Image: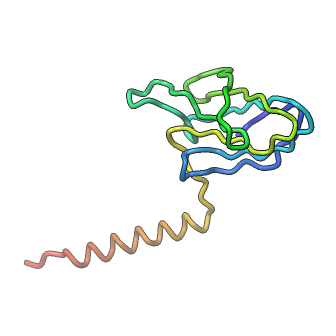
Amino acid sequence: IKYTISGGTVEDIEVESENFGLLVKINSLQDGKIILELPRESIDAEKQNGEDEKFIILINDVQTEYEEVQSGSTVRTIGINFEKGDSKIQVIGTYVIPEFGTIVMIILTIGILASILLTKNKFQIKI
């Protein structure tokens, strides 16, 4: 996730797959603003007909407004104002792609292949 921030620093950005969002941990030294470039392939907020839906933005668990800076076919850019002392910004959409580590992907692949092989052998038809 690309970002620019004034009035503080970004400590970490985490995927929150259980609520289809991102958690941005900040250290806000003064009132400021963060601009996030959100790739649509990773996180988005869409209606069922494919039109853009508003993201839900929570700062320290309190819902707040944001500015939609740009909305393109591959990226949505949003601006969020924050106050001195704020530490947690949540961006909640309608879906988010979790970031799996390499080892998780290897285990998942082995599991799928094992299932395919076991199923193939179990349902083999002999004539």
Which residue is located at x 43 percent, y 28 percent? 50
Query: Is 17 positioned to the left or the right of 26 in the image?
Result: left
Locate residue 86, reporting x and y percent.
81, 40
Quadrant (top left/top right/bottom left/bottom right) for the N terminus: top right
Which residue is located at x 25 percent, y 78 percent? 121
Query: Is 31 positioned to the left or the right of 66 in the image?
Result: right
Which residue is located at x 11 percent, y 79 percent? 126
Q: Is residue 33 above or below residue 26?
A: above
Locate residue 81, reporting x and y percent.
77, 28
Q: Is residue 125 above or below residue 23?
A: below
Quadrant (top left/top right/bottom left/bottom right) for the C terminus: bottom left
Q: Quadrant of residue 44?
A: top right
Q: How many marks?
A: 0
Q: Considering depth in this image, is 65 or 93 the residue closer to the camera?
A: 65
Q: Is residue 94 above or below residue 6?
A: below
Q: Quadrant of residue 26?
A: top right
Check the image and name the residue furthest to the right: 29
Which residue is located at x 31 percent, y 77 percent? 118
Q: Considering depth in this image, is 79 or 38 the residue closer to the camera?
A: 79
Q: Quadrant of residue 124?
A: bottom left
